[in-house]
């Protein structure tokens, strides 16, 4: 039986007396145990059974290592560029491959999408209205003078900004800010339309956007009427078409209410406004005007209405290669009895008002119309109507010239 006051030899596992310094079976020395230190060559586990009981087993160590590897793999996948916000997305483009998606735009205000228009009135708008148009930030404030208010539209991209100032009018007027897709594949630009007030005039049109890497404002001038729609690409060439009416025809041969005017088509490219009305891609516009104005030119009971419609009819017909036909209709239809001062000509070339001594006063409506259409580029300078297409006494040139 195992007695009290014994201990187990750590080398041979035999029981010896507790005071023994050497194991009588194997010769193991117990001297170091009195100092609390393990004997030479023994491990801590050998010296302390409690520590031995806490030793991790080999399968435990293996499990810990495996878990660590799995965690590392999962974290690496989660942090990869293809996984963001819980949604799988395409990896970033590698060198030589198509560019990755552009960096999302920080929205400074509600989006004004391409093709949309914001109607702004001082009566109802807050002190500042902010909209995001693509990468452009649009801020609309106001300038006030006495009882008149004008919109101030600041368009910026980063630190680069430009300002468009609208017409100074009463606070009840509405101004329009539109997002325009001007060039296919490019970001939108901002269009401001601002009406000046008055019976017939005028709607001023301005455009702000990037040109040559810098912000720029392009002035499309003022046009009669209350505004145009958001421009679209009518002929498929990738450039938006701004369509207005040729204001030169208004009041030229009749009162405003009776005056028809052919389309004017403008493009904005390279930061410049270009009149592209003569291009063949706009044939449909001129056929539509030819049909509408031609009906009034031929059939209107009122002579002033016929005289106001015939010029646009002939001009539109000239654009689509039907000048002879329309001219003959005009000669049969116009009224020679209306009391109206027709446009005059000028002997000298001038960008301003013709000197009185150089003015040409035409004696008939057809003569005045032909000179007018040539001056404005609708009819070639060398074109003359056939003998049957001019009323008697209306040959060329039957004009009063100063002496």
Image (cartoon, grey):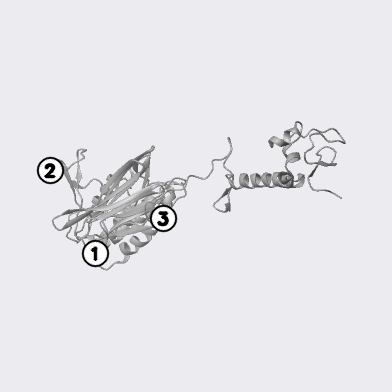
Q: Nearer the viewer, mark 3 or mark 2?
A: 3
Nearest to N terminus: mark 2 or mark 1: 1
Identify the mark at residue 270; answer none if there is no mark: none
- Residue 141 at x, y percent in the picture: 26, 53
Residue at 19% across / 48% down in the picture? 344
Q: Extreme top residue here?
A: 40
Q: Residues within 10 Å of mark 2 (few under 14, many from 20)?
A: few
Residue at 20% across / 58% down in the picture? 197
Mark 2 → mark 1, Cα distance in angstroms: 30 Å
Q: Residues within 10 Å of mark 1 (few under 14, many from 20)?
A: some
Mark 3 → mark 1, Cα distance in angstroms: 47 Å
User: Mark 1 highlights which residue?
Assistant: 303
Query: Is 342 positioned to the left or the right of 159 in the image?
Result: left
Nearer to me, 279 or 135? 135
Q: Does dot 3 land on a helix, a strand or a loop? A: loop
Residue at 34% across / 58% down in the picture? 118
Nearest to N terminus: mark 3 or mark 1: 3
**Contact (Cβ within 8 Å) of mark 3 with mark 1:** no
Q: Does dot 2 land on a helix, a strand or a loop? A: helix
Image quadrant in which you'd find residue 291: bottom left
Nearest to N terminus: mark 3 or mark 2: 3
Q: Nearer the viewer, mark 2 or mark 1?
A: 2
Image quadrant in which you'd find residue 309: bottom left
- Quarter of the image with the C terminus is top left
Q: Does dot 1 land on a helix, a strand or a loop? A: helix
Mark 3 → mark 2, Cα distance in angstroms: 53 Å
Identify the mark at residue 356; answer none if there is no mark: 2
Q: Nearer the viewer, mark 3 or mark 1?
A: 3
- Residue 165 at x, y percent in the picture: 24, 49
Nearer to me, 203 or 56? 56
- Residue 215 at x, y percent in the picture: 34, 41
Identify the mark at residue 113; answer none if there is no mark: 3
């Amino acid at each position: 039986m195992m007695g009290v006051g014994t201990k187990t030899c750590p080398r041979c596992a035999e029981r010896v007396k507790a005071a023994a310094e050497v194991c009588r079976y194997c010769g193991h020395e117990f001297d170091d145990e009195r100092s609390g230190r393990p004997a030479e060559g023994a491990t801590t586990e050998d010296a302390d059974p409690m520590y031995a009981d806490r030793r991790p087993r080999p399968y435990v160590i293996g499990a810990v290592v495996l878990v660590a590897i799995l965690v590392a793999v999962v974290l690496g996948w989660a942090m990869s560029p293809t996984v963001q916000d819980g949604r799988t997305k395409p990896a970033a483009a590698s060198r030589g491959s198509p560019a990755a998606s552009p960096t999302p735009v920080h929205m400074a205000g509600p989006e004004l999408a391409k093709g949309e228009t914001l109607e702004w009135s001082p009566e109802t708008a807050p002190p500042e209205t902010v909209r995001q148009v693509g990468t452009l930030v649009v801020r609309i404030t106001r300038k006030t003078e006495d009882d008149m208010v004008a919109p101030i539209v600041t368009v910026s991209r980063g630190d680069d900004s430009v300002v468009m100032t609208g017409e100074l009018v009463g606070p009840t007027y509405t101004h329009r800010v539109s997002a325009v897709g001007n060039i296919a594949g490019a970001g939108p630009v901002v269009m401001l339309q601002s009406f000046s007030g008055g019976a017939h005039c005028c709607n001023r049109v301005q455009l702000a956007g990037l040109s040559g890497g810098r912000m720029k404002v392009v002035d499309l001038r003022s046009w009669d009427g209350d505004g145009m729609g958001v421009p679209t690409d009518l002929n498929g060439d990738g450039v938006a078409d701004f369509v207005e009416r040729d204001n030169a025809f208004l009041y030229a041969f009749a009162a405003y209410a009776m005056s028809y005017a052919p389309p004017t088509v403008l493009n904005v490219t390279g930061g410049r406004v270009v009149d592209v009305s003569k291009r063949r891609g706009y044939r449909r516009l001129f056929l539509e005007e030819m049909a509408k104005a031609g009906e009034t030119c031929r059939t209107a009971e009122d002579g002033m209405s016929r005289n106001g419609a015939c010029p646009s009819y002939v001009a539109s017909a000239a654009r689509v290669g039907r000048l002879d036909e329309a001219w003959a209709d005009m000669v049969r239809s116009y009224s020679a009895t209306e009391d109206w001062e027709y446009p005059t000509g000028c002997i000298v070339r001038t960008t301003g008002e013709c000197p009185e001594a150089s003015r040409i006063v035409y004696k008939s409506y057809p003569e005045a119309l032909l000179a007018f259409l040539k001056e404005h580029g609708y009819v070639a300078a060398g074109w003359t109507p056939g003998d049957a297409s001019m009323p008697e006494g209306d040959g060329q040139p039957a004009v009063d010239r100063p002496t």
